[in-house]
């Protein structure tokens, strides 16, 4: 199994660990210490060694922050984790707070004074984050103190650095050789009038050098750094023990290979008098200080790899389509199996295990391989479905009971594409209120799928379309409508998205999720998610260029949860047409009872 169901939260240990941290804080002379959910690469999903926030507090979500003072400790999370954080932390020692309504910098502003010394690990704080803290410090008169990570001092059994093997991502799947990508990025560096760029994002390294790795769970990343000059060979800093002979020989033709420990020395040599393009949202202040102290000039600008990585080429788009057909077949086999199980006979773990088994076997049957799952499967029944990022474990495991709904959000990592799909399934006869909520979510999903929008439109401009039907009924959801998705890469990929802060212009070739939802605490949760690709719309007149979306996810939407009276004719036609296409594309790969199930699941509404 790729997924483990053992709970990694050790919230009960939090008070004692907080005591140890405070002892180090006193030794260091700091009155507060910042504990972000971050590593030196600003990954969303962290290697075990970097899970300092989880170790200290017990909170295991993918977005969070802790401010530990000598008297209190605040754990900040967003709306996805409001319930989870209270379940995992010891509230006698830690206080939950909203990451969005009262973020850490604002909390510091309201609660710190001119006698306070705020300690931080400079390897975990980005340039832009530091600007916010410096602004607060100047306002209230407190001191900011860089220190070696205090948690590392007291975490006695801290895991070792990951050393997953690196593999080559062939042009067959990448669509462009690495030397051409390097030249493309060097042209962008020259355009910014810079001498070098510093890359710390492992996803950028993976794209640029056509490699994949095994250092981060579910995401095929190899941790490392790179200095890319405007001309000449890049420098790639990656542990040699990760590289086999073929990987070493191939990468040596593209870059100078170095151990990560030599990054500081190399930066000092290269920086003097040079302009270094640094992404202030990715580069930590530890590296920024090295550049400045060596006489380098930091030019703030976005990681030049991010946008080329987000705009998929034709090979990557073709691969994504193929991966989603394969994944759709696996999902249909799973949903057919699920429908044939008696209510109350399965647990959330049973279902998640079965889905992973089917993905593995189906990939083999279709001539491929499931390299990993895209993320821990959200296998949530009844009230657990109301937790958008619920992660089942042996303690929380719950039965799929009659009269409830089951939400499964999952995905697969294939060499030709990354998938992410959510389906909400009726277990027995659903209540009318649940059908109403499901149909309102479906209306929002359809609105995004069918929209035609002008060139230059941003994700923020489309977000309200997914929420309109819910808003009209006094309802909403606390997460974004869509996130970018990589190509055998991170399942969450920027800069594209559809949400209230999505300012990136949507461009053809970008892959985004379409996943409106609705959640009622202690009752039920609903989400419908497909992946879509931005594409040029067929010109039908008018004076502007427009874009639209191409759906690439093919799995039936549960008609048992649809209240047809709430759909207009166009929406009914959309669902029937979608199901007609699902049947056409997946039926060649199914037979017997599974084909019969698909025929029924895709019949007209």
Image (spheres, rainbow, N blue to C red):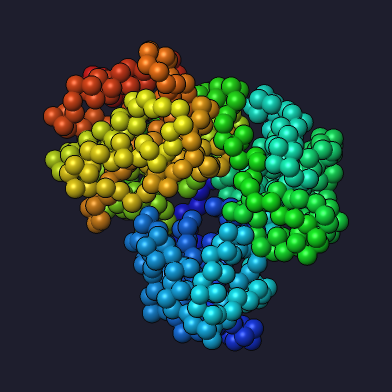
Q: Position of residue 50 (x, y in %)?
A: 61, 62
Residue found farthest to the front:
543
Q: Relative to residue 299, is residue 489 drawn left or right?
A: left
* Image position of 105 (left or right of 605): right
Q: Nearer the viewer, residue 343 or 146?
A: 146
Quadrant of residue 521 in the image? bottom left
Residue 183 seen by the camera: yes
Residue 335 coordinates in the image, percent (x, y): 35, 33
Image vertical order of residue 235 relative to residue 334, above or below? below
Q: Residue furthest top?
A: 540
The answer, for residue 342, to whether it is visible in the render is no
Which residue does the image show at 65% across and 55% down from the upper left?
283
Location of the C terminus (image quadrant): top left
- What residue is rendered at 74% in x and 50% in y? 276
Compared to residue 583, the image places residue 140 above or below, namely: below
x 31%, y 37%: residue: 466
For residue 510, above or below residue 35 = above
Q: Name the residue rendered at 22%, 44% in the picture.
A: 471
- Across and down, in percent, residue 384 comes to 31, 53
């Amino acid at each position: 199994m790729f997924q483990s169901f053992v709970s990694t939260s050790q919230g009960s240990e939090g008070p004692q660990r907080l005591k140890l941290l405070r002892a180090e804080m006193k030794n260091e002379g700091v009155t507060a210490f910042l504990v972000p959910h971050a590593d030196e690469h600003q990954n969303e999903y962290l290697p075990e060694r970097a899970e300092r926030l989880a170790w200290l507090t017990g909170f295991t979500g993918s977005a969070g922050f802790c401010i530990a003072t000598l008297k209190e400790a605040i754990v900040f999370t967003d709306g996805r984790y409001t319930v989870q954080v209270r379940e995992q932390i010891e509230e006698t020692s830690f206080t939950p707070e909203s990451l969005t309504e009262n973020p850490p910098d604002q909390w510091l502003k309201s609660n710190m004074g001119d006698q306070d010394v705020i300690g931080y690990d400079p390897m975990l704080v980005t340039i832009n984050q530091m600007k916010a803290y410096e602004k607060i410090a100047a306002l209230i008169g407190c001191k900011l103190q860089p220190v070696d990570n205090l948690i590392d001092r007291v975490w006695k059994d801290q895991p070792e650095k990951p050393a997953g093997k690196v593999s080559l991502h062939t042009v067959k799947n990448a669509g462009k050789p690495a030397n051409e990508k390097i030249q493309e990025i060097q042209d962008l560096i020259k355009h910014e009038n810079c001498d070098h760029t510093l890359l710390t994002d492992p996803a950028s390294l993976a794209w640029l050098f056509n490699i994949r790795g095994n250092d981060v769970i579910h995401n095929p990343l190899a941790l490392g750094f790179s200095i890319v000059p405007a001309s000449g060979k890049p420098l790639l800093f990656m542990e040699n023990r990760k590289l086999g002979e073929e990987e070493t020989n191939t990468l040596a033709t593209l870059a100078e290979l170095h151990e990560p420990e030599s990054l500081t020395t190399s930066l000092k040599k290269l920086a003097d008098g040079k302009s270094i393009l640094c992404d202030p949202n990715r580069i930590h202040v530890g590296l920024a200080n090295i550049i400045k102290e060596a006489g380098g000039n930091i030019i703030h600008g976005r990681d030049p790899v991010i946008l080329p990585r987000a705009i998929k080429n034709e090979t990557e788009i073709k691969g994504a389509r193929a991966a989603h057909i394969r994944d759709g077949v696996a999902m249909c086999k799973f949903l057919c199996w699920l429908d044939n199980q008696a209510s109350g006979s399965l647990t959330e773990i049973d279902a998640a295990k079965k889905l992973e088994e089917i993905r593995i076997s189906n990939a083999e049957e279709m001539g491929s391989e499931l390299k990993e799952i895209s993320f821990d499967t959200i296998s949530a029944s009844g009230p657990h479905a109301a937790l958008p990022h619920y992660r089942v474990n042996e303690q929380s495991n719950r039965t799929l009971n009659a009269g409830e709904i089951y939400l499964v959000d999952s995905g697969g990592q294939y060499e030709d594409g990354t998938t992410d799909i959510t389906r909400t399934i009726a277990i027995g006869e659903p209540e009318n209120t649940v059908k109403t909520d499901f149909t309102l979510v479906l209306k929002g999903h359809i609105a995004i799928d069918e929209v035609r929008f002008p060139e230059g439109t941003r994700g923020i401009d489309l977000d309200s379309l997914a929420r309109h039907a819910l808003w009209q009924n006094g309802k909403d959801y606390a997460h974004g409508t869509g996130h970018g998705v990589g190509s055998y890469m991170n399942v969450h990929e920027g800069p594209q998205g559809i949400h209230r802060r999505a300012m990136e212009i949507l461009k053809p070739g970008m892959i985004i999720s379409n996943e409106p939802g609705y959640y009622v605490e202690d009752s039920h949760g609903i989400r419908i998610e497909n992946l879509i690709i931005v594409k040029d719309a067929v010109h039908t007149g008018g004076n502007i260029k427009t874009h639209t979306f191409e759906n690439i996810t093919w799995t039936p939407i549960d008609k048992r949860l649809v209240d047809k009276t709430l759909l207009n004719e166009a929406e009914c036609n959309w669902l029937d047409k979608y199901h007609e296409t699902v049947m056409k594309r997946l039926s060649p790969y199914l037979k017997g009872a599974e084909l019969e199930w698909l025929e029924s699941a895709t019949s007209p509404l």
